[in-house]
Structures are given as C-alpha cells and as structure tokens.
Amino acid sequence: MTSRLLLRDPNFSRVWWSGLISNVGNGALFIALPAYVYTETGSTLQTAAVVIAAALPSTVVGQFAGVLVDRLDYRWVLLWSNIALAAVTLMYLLDVHAAWWFLALIAFVSSSVGQFLGPAENALLPTLVPEERLGEANSLNSLNNSLARLVGPALGGFVLAQYGFTTVILFDALTFLVAALLISSVQAPTFDRPHAQTRVAFLKEWKEGLAVIAERPALKVLLVVVSIAAFGEGFISTLMVPFVTDVLGGNGQTLGLIMSVQAVGGLIGAWVMGRQADRRPALQLLAWGGLGSGLLLVAYFNYALIYPVIWPALVITAIAGTPFAMFGIAQNLGLQRASPPETRGRVFSACYGLMGLTQLAGMGVSGLLGERVGVLVINVDAATYLIAGSLAWWALYRGVGRSEGEPEPKVSRTV
C-alpha cells in the first residue's frame, strides 16, 4: 500500500488534517509572538522570558498530562484540548499592549494545555492503523509537521507585518477550532481503563509509567538517546541566530530561508521513511538518523571557516532534512512499539519531559559557553547527535528491543 491509501482512511485522515491545521497556526504564532514582544519592549531579555515560559511546561505539566491522558479517551482529550487552546489563545486579545509578563503567563498556560496533545495523539495513532503500518503513519505525521513548519512561520510573519498581531491571534484560535471539529467526527476503539474510575493518586500512576520504562530495555535506551540529542538542540536553539549572523554573514531573511529549506528536506525525509519505517527496528532508524544528522551538522557548522558563503548551508540543510525526519519518526515509533497501550500517554509524557529538561540545560550551558568560548561551541549539537546515533547502533546489535515488537534489523551485504 502507499501513503495515499492510508490518508484515505477517514479516521486517520481527520486526525492528520487536524494536526496539520493546528500546527500551521502554532507556527504562525511561534514567529509572531517573540517578534511582537521584541517590538513592544525592545528587550531581548523579556523576549527570551516569553519564549522560555512556553518551553517550561513540558518538564512538569507534561508529566501530569500523561497520567490524565491514560485515564481518559484519547479522542476526547484531543477534542477538548484544542477547544481550550482556542480559548486561551484569545486571551492575548484582552490587552494587545500588555506587559511582557502577562504575555509570558498566557504563553505558559497555552503551552501547559498543549502538553496534552502530543501524548494523546501518539497514543491514539496505534488504535487507528494496523500495527504493520504504524511506521507509515508516523512518517505521514512527520510530513504533516514539515508542511506546518514550511507554511506556518512564513504565514505568521506575513500576517503580522500586513495585518497586525490581533489577526495572528484570531487565525491561530481558528485553527484550533477547526482541528476540534475534525476530531469530533473521529471514530476510535475504546479500552477498559482501570484507573479512570478510581481515586488512585496521580503520583502513583506517574510512577507506574516510569516503572514500565525501567522494565523495558528498548524504552530506557530510547529515552537516553533522544535526551542526549535534546541537550544538543539546546545549543542550536540559543546560538543559531548568532551563528547565522557572525559565521555565515547572514541576517533574519537568511534564517527564515534556512528554516524553509529544512522543512522541504523534512518532507523528503518523511516520504522516504514512509517506505522504510515499518521494515526496520526503531533503534536502527535512530542510529542512521543520529549519525547522518551529526555528520551533516559538522559540515554545516564548520564549512564557512574555509568557504564563507551561504549557499552550502542551504544545500546541507535540505539534505539533513532526511536524517532529522528519520530520527524524529523513529523516536515516536519506538515508544509506540515498546509501550503497553494503557501506559502510552505516561511514557510519551516522560519522554517529552526528559527531553525538555535536557534541552533547557543545553540552553543554559550554551549561553555560558557561547560568551566564553565563542559561537562555534554550537558544534556540541553535532557531537550529541553522533553520540546518540552511536549509542542506538550499539544497543541494536546488543539485541535491545527484539522481544518488544521490533522487526529484525536488515543489514545490506553489498556495502
């Protein structure tokens, strides 16, 4: 079967389109909000505070979200989370010239509500498609995210410049309402949820989710691998703008072009993975994605020391879209394959929380090292992907995951 046939399934298609539409709105606000805050305040510190406020909930609120998601119907969680996000987003309109701390508070609340979407969608997905097409479904979701990154930020910048911040807010809220409408017509199987009718403490259920991870070698390795990469992503989050400015000699337009090219590469990567993901172990895909990303990042961060022009950065970024997509798809696929259905929400939330925590640590360390060592300390991001890929490769050939729903690794003999 092809990916097109899977998109013809009405339930999967509605979830896919709802994610695409809401992610386009998120991408628009992702660009518009910090730009608006900086325009209003003229302060990089206050702008950074708003961005950090949106990043914090994944480390704490996400853990609570995972427990609640496993208590409830996944479709119901997606429906009401989108409705709540529309309402919270409209709160920006209470005072469009509000103080930065008020905007940061709304960003924190909005991000907190958004923590329910990821665990619910990733837990719902295996109930909508056959197990043998789960990799293809995750690849289509990666395609979804790349399309949103391609369209959303550019649309947000355009709407902000032409029509103002208020219009961006209205657009973002509308995307959540459309997403909720699509989810409302999804038909998904229901499961007995032993915790849903009891008063078992959230802390105990959260610990049960961690116990599942501790008992399953594939989950433990996956969390370590993706957390290592997330630490490096903290470096690129903090130092990307100075790198483009100081090393590549670019500007804001250059950065926007790089983001768009990366999204195009992600589309290609998702297409490739749609034909490979169901045939391969998640750790094998993580290994390829991590090693490929790391090698390309080494070239990306350092070529300008010898050949200081911008076009190679665009070419490398486009090529890197494939291993980056592979890494992200393998992460979700591995968690889905190795997690019992009744604990998937908690497992995904634990993963997101650990990744968020290590990424925040990377942001802090990179800020300090960037001042003392220079912007080329961004190479730590390349190193973490190489380490993560190597660890995944080692675990794969130690046999990790072979008893947890993973296909046997396929190694070419014609290398």
Image (tube, rainbow, N blue to C red):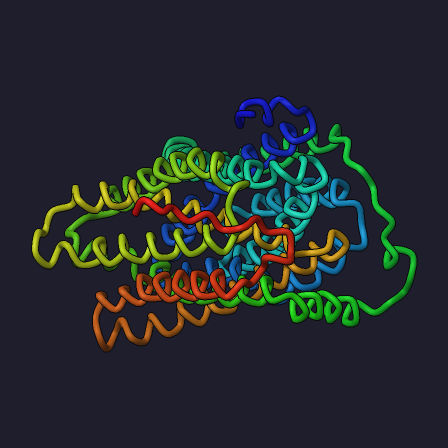
Residue 163 vertical placement versus 391 (above, below): above
Left or right placement of residue 145 versus residue 248 in this view: right
Q: Is residue 282 visible?
A: yes
Which residue is at 62% across, 63% downward?
Answer: 350
Left or right placement of residue 257 versus residue 136 in this view: left
Which one is in front, 115 or 292?
Answer: 292
Which residue is at 56% across, 50% downward?
Answer: 332
Left or right placement of residue 216 versus residue 288 in this view: right
Which residue is at 17% across, 44% downward?
Answer: 312
Q: Position of residue 156 (x, y in %)?
A: 43, 37
Q: How many marks?
A: 0
Q: Position of residue 361 (x, y in %)?
A: 44, 72
Q: Position of residue 11 (x, y in %)?
A: 69, 29
Q: Is residue 174 visible?
A: no
The quadrant in which residue 64 appears is: bottom right
| Screen quadrant of the N terminus | top right
Which residue is at 27% across, 71% downward?
Answer: 370
Which one is in front, 400 or 229?
Answer: 400
Q: Position of residue 65 (x, y in %)?
A: 70, 58
Which one is in front, 272 or 298?
Answer: 272
